[in-house]
Image (cartoon, coloured by chain):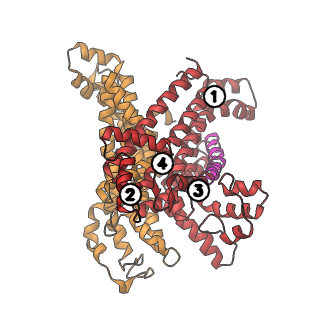
Amino acid sequence: MKIYEYAIRRIFLLIFVIFGVTIITFIFTRVLLNPLAAYITDKTPPDAVIAIIQAHGFDRPIYEQYFIYLKDLVTLDWGWSNVGHMALTDAIRTFFPATVELTILAIIITVLIGVPLGIISALKNNKWQDHASRIFSLVGISIPVFWLGLSLQYAFTYWTRSIGLPFLPSTGRVDPLLLIQNPVQGWTGMLMLDSFLQGNFVITLDVFKHLILPAITLAFLNVGILTRLTRSSMLEVIRQDYITMAKAYGLPRRVIIYKYALKNAMIPVITSVGLIFGGMLGGAIITESIFSYPGMGWLSYRAIVFNDSNTILAYVVVVAIIFVSVNLLVDIIYAWLDPRIKY
Amino acid sequence: MTSTNRNSSRTGSLKYKEFRYSLHLLFSNKLVVFGMCIVLFFSTLAIIGPLLVDPNEPMNVNFKNDLLPPSWEHPFGTDDLGRDVFKLVILGARYDLSISLLVVAIAAIVGIFVGAVSGYVGGKVDELFMRIVDILFAFPGLILAMAISMVLGRSFLNLFLSLVLVWWTSYARFMRGQVLAEREKLYVKASKSLGLSNFRTLFRHVLPNAVFPMIILATMDIGSVMLSAAGLSFIGLGPSPFEPEWGTLVNRGAPYLFMAPWLISIPGVTILLASLGFNLMGDGIRDVLDPRLRR
């Protein structure tokens, strides 16, 4: 089978999975919970409610309602977000870029620490470097994210300030006063990128300062996962015959590792970086809620607190679609990188 | 694993030797022993905790004592409701350990059953189950659990249910792969040609051969289930404040971070230790049971 045939088959599967996802969210929003909640607020006049019921088909049979729900999804008529105080699609457009920005920084940290640590750990198998990095990654996967976030906040904003050292901001995305003095036009919604492109480096630096602690918090668990994965993948590769062969040829160790071993060892690592990225986009809820970082995770956290199921389920749909698309992309890259793979 | 039992007494003694060698390997690893000690310690706390301290402590609200720093009387201080954090943490062991063990156990049983049937029967059944698994896999872990417990309402039972609903899929997928590999082996054909029913072949012969890696997966999952449960209750989807689950304790302590840091650090470190214990143990068991990693 050719690679594009594989890609086409996977895209069909993706469409099927997205239908499945919408069935689940349909059951949640329109069957188990009150479907009207998304479209009315306290201020909706009673006679308008009937029109809304008819417009969205809440009086129709269930199977018809599903298609109406799909139509609403596609036409971006997602209803109102009570915690966002705006239409849901607007809320996602406003808050999602912040999450993407945080996730990108976190994934950079994860890769920059996790991959080298895993490689060192594998090359120094059973030496002290290996033990140290294994313990570090074990602690990484065992640490509760919320506790890590709160502790970082305590250490780097409260404690460093109390002994007179420079400190990092504990909450928010940017200093609002600074933003008023140096306005940034919203091109992509990613404040750091926008301000950088517009040459507004004061804001870039401030946003970066706000991002450090949340990004470390979000990255920490994944550093542990990635280190362990890189280590085991590298160990597997350097035990293979072709590496022994290269050694027997008398090639220098550096060439063997960087030219022969690393390429093959990195294939599963790339796949899992894709998975981690998708997971981070969805898993940022805890991190964002601790640092009051105004992204989608923070919005969903507030939605949980104020029982706004509509916002949460919209977020679930968005994250699921992104997650499966990233997975698809990663699988195709995987197949393209590794010609040994049979589909 | 699938050794033909031509000489049962000999293989028996071999298996016993193998078992003893595995145990020796397990106990010669200091980190694993450390992990086991932690697990044993918290299991003991979970069982006898209510005997050690007053089980009514979560109800013991006393605003005169709120936010007291650690002292002899209250070794870990008191929380915003004036309750002793030391006692709450001890009582919380029962909640966190039971939820992580139960979630893993039930999810593994459901997943193993579905995966085994799916892989063995094949055809439309397989297609149906695996598509369901595919759909559930489309949600990043915590997100689906969050949505489910949001829909079901906030309680300890619903937290448990939502985690099971999310976690069984990975076991099902993995088990299906195992059964698919086993199905082609000679002993399955032999068992069929002897006229054994499909049910008996699957559950008496294929399952014991395929279930082994599941056990490794399950031991390694306990720690992450514990973290997920604590995380969900931290964002407010857990039990009520009167059930002293550790994540809930951190959640209640978070607003007092700068005034009373012991409120989050004590339960936080407790969760870290407990999940570290389970992860160390799981890693050790995997290293011993997976022969490729032994040397």
Q: CA gap, disc 4 to disc 2?
A: 17 Å
Residue A9 appears left or right of B162: right
Query: Circle 4: is it few (<14), some (14-19), or many (20+) Cα within 10 Å?
Result: some
Residue A202 appears left or right of A190: right
Select label 1 or label 2 by which is in front: 2
Question: Could you tell me residue A124's position as x and y percent?
Answer: 64, 43
Residues shaded magenta: A101-123
Residue B90 appears left or right of A139: left
Q: Residue at x 42, y 45 (%)?
A: B220
What residue did someone put label 2 on?
A48
Select label 4 or label 3 by which is in front: 4
> Chain A rendered in what hue?
red
Tag 1: residue type? Leu
Q: Chain of mark 3?
A: A
For residue A123, above or below residue A206: above
What residue did someone put label 4 on?
A77
Q: Residue at x 77, y 61 (%)?
A: A201
Q: Is residue B16 visible?
A: yes
